[in-house]
Each structure stands twice: as C-alpha cells, then as structure tokens.
Amino acid sequence: MLQKLQQWRARREPWVEGNWLALDIETNGLDSRNDAMLAIAWVPIQPPLILLDKAGYRVVKSAVNLNQSAVIHQLSAADIAAGLPLYDVLREFCSVAEGANIVAHNAQFDLAVLANALKQHNATDSANSLQWKPQGVYCTLAAERKRMQRRALSVQQGDLTLAGCRARYGFESFAGHQALNDAVACAELFLAQAYRFGAGHQLTVKALLNEG
C-alpha cells in the first residue's frame, strides 16, 4: 500500500524532478525472448543534466555463439569471455534502477530482454532470485511516432531509428550500436522531446510517461 502511494506521488511530481534512467541492451539477435544479452548500459538523467559520471556499461559473460549482431555491437569473443556473470550484471542493474523510470529507444524490446534474463537467472538460481520492475517506462521511439502522427507527417524508412529521431532535433551523428553510446544518445533525445513537449505548461512525470 505504501509503495503504491509513493508511486502515485512520484508520478505527480514535475517531470524535471523525476527519477529517470536511460537504458540500452545489446543482444546477439532480434528475438527478445530467445537471444542472449551481450551488454547493458545505463545512464541517470537529472534534467537538464545527463550524469555521465554515474553511467554504467557491463558486458555479460556468455557461451553463446557470436553472430553478425555481435560484430555490429563492436563485441568480440574475447570481450564476451572476459565479461561478468549474468547474475552480477543483473544484480547491479536492479540496484541502480530501483524506483527509476526507464527511458529507452524501442523500450519494449529492451525490457523484454531484461525480463527474459531475470527469468532465466531465477529459474537456475532460485536461492539468489532477483525481482525488479520499472517505476515507469518512456519510449523515445513511441513518443516520436506520436509527435509525427500529430503533425500528419509520413514515416519513411529510417525516420524512427535513434539516429533518425535525433536528427530532427538537430543532434549530430554518433557512434551507434554500442550500448553506452546508445544509452547516452537516447538520454539526449529524451531531454529534447520532453522539453519540446512540455514547453509552455507544467508537465508531470505521469503526463510525460503517457507521451512515451
């Protein structure tokens, strides 16, 4: 009951006072339910700041066969072999993300990968099970799609990629397909979207979450 009350209050705060955490996860494929998590990155957002000094990037130790996806994400077999155990990575992330509103580009995919990784760990190590769910979720891709629909803009191929969305806000290109770079790029896009959407009126955490 107390947790629900705290969540209710948090959602009615001004969005600039919210607890925001940008997230990006790299996998060895596009199947969120079956492909392995290779790397995860996060960066806290304290509007108007992105707290790079508190950002995290972790590679997951895995025995999966690397395919072209891993190459795209700039990961080698040596990187994966030197990574951290899945439990250690998940435990750290769950601690950092406790009570946070997650910000991600195509958030549905990242959260599905994360949920599957937690389920996989808990099934094999129930003694050290991990439980986590986000306070709220903001998807920069979904928010940009809504914005384009309101302006009756047609969506062309590439328009809703992270790079395509950022370009409409005047951001320069970035070195994508690396988890930390993508998390920071997503955080920048989030701030641009939020300030534009909230211009001229008091915007709450709840209203912004509904937008994304």
Image: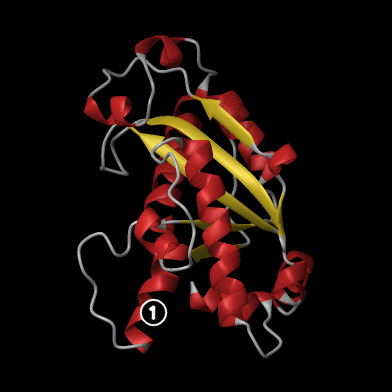
Q: Is residue 132 left or right of residue 124?
A: right
Residue at the location (55% across, 27% down)?
Answer: 58
Element on which disc 1 rests: helix
Closer-to-camera residue (27/48): 48
Residue on which the image places disc 1: 146
**Compared with residue 34, is residue 1 higher up or lower down, i.e. above or below?**
below
The colouring scheme, among rainbow, by chain, secondary structure or one colour, is secondary structure
Which quadrant of the rendered structure holds the N terminus?
bottom right
Nearer to us in this view, 97 or 58: 58
Which corner quadrant of the image does residue 208 belong to?
A: bottom right
* Residue in the foreground of this view, choosing between 83 and 182: 182
**Hey, which quadrant is residue 188 in on the image?**
bottom right
User: What is the x, y in percent for residue 133?
Assistant: 57, 53
Whether residue 1 appears in this view of the structure is no
Residue 203 image position (x, y, % from top left): 67, 83
| Count of residue discs | 1
Residue 132 drawn at (x, y percent): 59, 48
Tell me residue 168's x, y (percent): 41, 68
Kind of residue indicated by mark 1: Lys
* Horizontal side, residue 88 vs residue 174: left or right: right
Q: Which residue is rendered at x = 41% and y = 9% of the image?
A: 78
Residue drawn at the location 58% of the way across and 31% of the way down: 57
